[in-house]
Amino acid sequence: MGSEAENREAFRIQQHYCETMGAPITARIAGALAAAVTRESRTGARVLDWAGEPTRGALPLRLVGGLHALALAGADEALARVFAGAGDAGGIEPVLRRVLVAQDAALLPWLDGPPQTNEPGRSAALMTGLLHVARRHGPRLEVLEIGSSAGLNLLLDRFRFDLGGVAVGSADAPLLIRPEWRGSPPPAVPVAFRSVRGCDIQPLDATDPEVAARLAAYVWADNPERLERLRTAIALLREHGVALDRADAADWLDARLAEPQEAGVTRVLMHSVVWQYLPDATQHRVQAAMAGAAAVAAPVRPLAWVRMEPDRQTAQQHVLVASWPGHAEQVTVADAQAHGAWIAGRAG
């Protein structure tokens, strides 16, 4: 359990992350909350007495998400103006302080679980990693995603990508994802998805309007293009659906790795911005399961691990790839902005 000072500092740390990622509105809100949170409300008291590491638990983003939901719903005009970018930190602090008390009952449940942004833009970074796998082992992939949230990244076989001029996906796909590209382009190789499946300990049904509104609340107010992309992906989800199971990540992966693997198909574990939320015991079980599967991987039935996970020091994501046989050393193939706004490919 952190001290009150440490829990307040988590909001300033989040402010720094947001500034680094080009989100000044959300940065101002996070910074102002460091001072605006008081014990006048149950929400404020719970924040200040947070049981756990506040940054790892995404405490600031839980509260910002709840506030953004109120703003999007039109619950408070002054709060809506704050999320529209009006005012400086000093000017918005009184608004936040008032809303925390007035909307206490609505905000308190937002602290119960971590944000599930399920940002479709991250699939561009994951696709970058998958292209490196395809170059190593061939185009046919069986993708297993843990921490899938609402499963929007399980639609990556239905998106179209422009990755530094490398096109992936159907030309008539309803969603084109084109991040700002920096550095070396990914391998221009074909990729064919044999299957794409996922799991989450508490999956969200994004086809439910209330859930869709919750996902929208976690989209930073600075990024309207992200909100439009989210809505397009949810429409695609309603049309096609995805293979998404409610399961513990380690239990589910154990079961999937035990299934027969088709010859000529690479089995890929994939995840993005999920590792920090897994309990230590689950992390260890996932690592052990992959080590066991890697030990028996063969050229005709390869195994790969593609992940997009944060570097807390730089507020950037690293796209990491390892595969077996022959490529056991984890390699960073790209760096990325947390929501996929830009990707910087690395040579090799």
Image: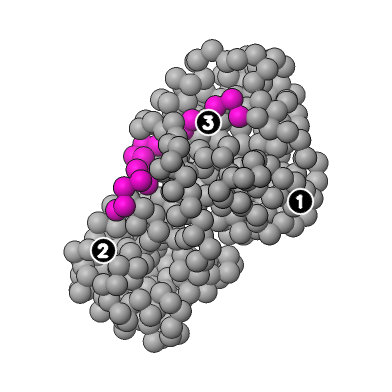
Q: Which residues are magenta?
A: 193-210
Residue at point 43%, 64% (across, down): 10
Residue 35 location in percent, x, y? 36, 77
Q: Pick whichever, 150 or 91, lies toward us.
A: 150
Examine the image and state in which quarter residue 240 appears. Answer: top left
Is residue 26 visible in the rendered structure shown here? yes
- The label shown at residue 165 is 1
Q: Which residue is mark 2?
A: 107
Q: Tag 3, which secondary structure?
A: strand
Q: Is residue 87 left or right of residue 187?
A: left
Residue at point 55%, 56% (across, down): 339
Residue 96 belongs to magenta span = no
- The label shown at residue 127 is none
- The label shown at residue 196 is 3
- Outermost front residue: 172
> Sequence-wise, which precedes: disc 2 or disc 3?
2
Q: Residues within 10 Å of mark 1 (few under 14, many from 20)?
A: few
**Residue type, numbered disc 3:** Val
